Amino acid sequence: MSLVGKKAPSFSAAAVVNGNEIVNSFSLDQFLGSKYVLFFFYPKDFTFVCPTELHAFQSKLADFEARGCAVVACSTDTEESHWSWLQMDKNKGGINGVKYPVVADTTKAISTNFGVLAGDYDYNDSGELVAMGPMIAYRGLFLIDKTGVVQHQVINNFPLGRSVNEALRMVDALIHFEENGEVCPADWHKGEDAMTASFDGVADYLSAH
């Protein structure tokens, strides 16, 4: 399921913000009209690849913020699990030092609506409800513009960590397109020449923004 070109699913859920504060009704709606959002899912707290990604996003957080882009993480763990992991030192496998919000998708509804939940529910021969799969999130990443529309998404399987620099490049490309009306070719980076394109999709996007 692709969400590109569609409104990002709305939600309200518990999250840990600033590395130590649990809030009960966190929503991406707070950024509408003011910030881009880089919203990414990871499978589980207290694992191996996941902390490398969360620390990598933290290391580039100032770069995202300088571009007016909020970074928000999410997994199906509880807010209490997030909080405990955030208190654990990096050299012990923790994510202490991560300051952007980490959302708790305990109902798995957010992961389902964003199309990244690995698994589903079904009934066995006895009529009992059972989980068919691990019921945790793939490594999904979504770049959401200021109107709440998804402009970029990528979903990796569990073993495959993502490139934070590529995510930042996508933010730069979106900003360049919005500000200049130029489209960005393969491997384009901020400061390089882009291209002029004339087709309905470009005009429609610019008129809506």
Image (tube, rainbow, N blue to C red):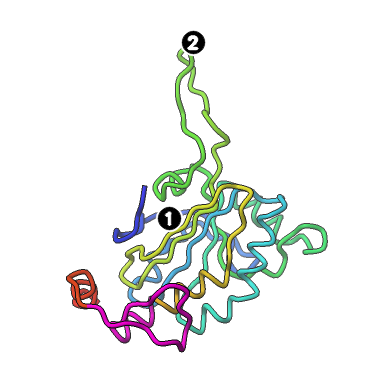
Mark drawn on residue 208: none
The residue tagged 2 is 126
Q: Amino acid at mark 1?
A: Ser
The quarter of the displayed image where residue 58 is located: bottom right
Residue 201's spot in the image, x, y percent? Answer: 21, 69
Mark drawn on residue 12: 1
Image point (60%, 48%), residue name: 43
Q: Quadrant of the C terminus?
A: bottom left
* Most distant residue in the right direction: 91
38 to 185, vertically: above or below: above
Residue 2's spot in the image, x, y percent? Answer: 36, 52
Seen from the viewer's position, the closer of residues 83 and 137 is 137
Structural crowding at the residue carrying mark 2, measured as other residues with C-alpha within 10 Å and reported as few (<14), some (14–19) or many (≥20):
few
The quarter of the displayed image where residue 31 is located: bottom left
Q: Is residue 32 left or right of residue 104?
A: left
Q: Magenta stretch: give its range.
A: 174-197
Q: Amino acid at mark 2?
A: Ser
Image point (49%, 75%), residue name: 169
Residue 121's spot in the image, x, y percent? Answer: 46, 29
Q: CA distance from mark 2 to mark 1?
A: 35 Å
Seen from the viewer's position, the closer of residues 206 and 35 is 206
Task: First in sequence, mark 2 or 1: give its number.
Answer: 1
Residue 95's spot in the image, x, y percent? Answer: 71, 62
Seen from the viewer's position, the closer of residues 100 and 160 is 160
The quarter of the displayed image where residue 161 is located: bottom right
Structural crowding at the residue carrying mark 1, measured as other residues with C-alpha within 10 Å and reported as few (<14), some (14–19) or many (≥20):
some
Q: Secondary structure at mark 2?
A: loop
Q: Is residue 18 left or right of residue 146?
A: right
Which mark's residue is nearer the viewer, 2 or 1? 2
Residue 8 falls inside the magenta stretch: no
Q: Secondary structure at mark 1?
A: loop
10 to 179, vertically: above or below: above
